Each structure stands twice: as C-alpha cells, then as structure tokens.
Image (cartoon, rainbow, N blue to C red):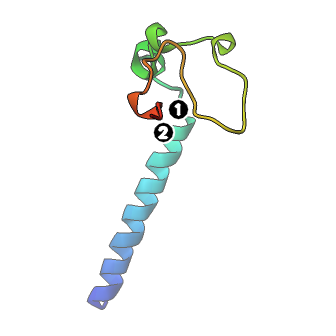
C-alpha cells in the first residue's frame, strides 16, 4: 500500500470524526451554563423596544441612555 493512500485514509478518518462530533454537538441539548442569561447578556444591557426611536433613513443611530457623541456636533 503506497504512503499517500495511508495518508488519505487518515485524513478521511479525521474528517469523519470531526463531522460526527459536530453532529453530536448540534443534536445534544444545550448545557445550562451556556443558556443562562449571565452568559450572553445582562439585564443592565437590555432595553425594551419602546425606548428605541423609530427608523429614519437619514441620521445617526443613538442608543438609549447613551452619552452624546462630541464628534457629531458641527461648528
């Protein structure tokens, strides 16, 4: 058996193992540590949609409770 055939067989086995592990991770239920609110966001960073201004096609986005941008003022 030539050396390149063994290398190809090892490569295919590694790719198959990685695809099986990926499928198992996608099918398995999420762990409690990843789904906790402290992991992705906190209540301090949450703003209800009513606090956001309606969409306008011209202008800059200003998030609620943010400091004014000193560079946006034109002299």
Q: Relative to residue 62, is residue 36 depicted above or below?
A: above
**Quarter of the rendering containing residue 71:** top left
Q: Which mark is residue 12?
A: none
Q: Left of 3 or right of it: where is 48?
A: right
Q: In this view, which residue lies farthest toward the bottom? A: 2
Residue located at (45% from left, 8% from top): 44
Residue located at (72% from left, 29% from top): 55
Q: Relative to residue 1, is residue 45 depicted above or below?
A: above
Q: Position of residue 56 (x, y in %)?
A: 72, 32
Residue located at (45% from left, 34% from top): 75
Q: Left of 59 or right of it: where is 22?
A: left
In the foreground, 70 or 57: 70
Residue located at (57% from left, 30% from top): 61
Q: Which mark is residue 28?
A: 1
Q: In this view, which residue lies farthest toward the top? A: 43
Q: In this view, which residue lies farthest toward the front? A: 75
Q: Secondary structure at mark 1?
A: loop
In the foreground, 18 or 60: 60
**Disc 2 packing (10 Å; few <14; some 14–19; many ≥20):** few
Q: Which mark is residue 25?
A: 2
């Amino acid at each position: 058996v030539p050396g390149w055939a063994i290398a190809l067989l090892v490569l295919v086995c590694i790719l198959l193992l990685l695809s099986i592990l990926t499928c198992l991770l996608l099918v398995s239920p999420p762990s409690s540590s990843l789904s906790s609110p402290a992991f992705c966001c906190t209540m301090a960073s949450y703003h209800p949609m009513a606090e956001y201004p309606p969409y306008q096609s011209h202008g800059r986005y200003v998030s609620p409770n943010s400091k004014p941008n000193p560079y946006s003022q034109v002299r």
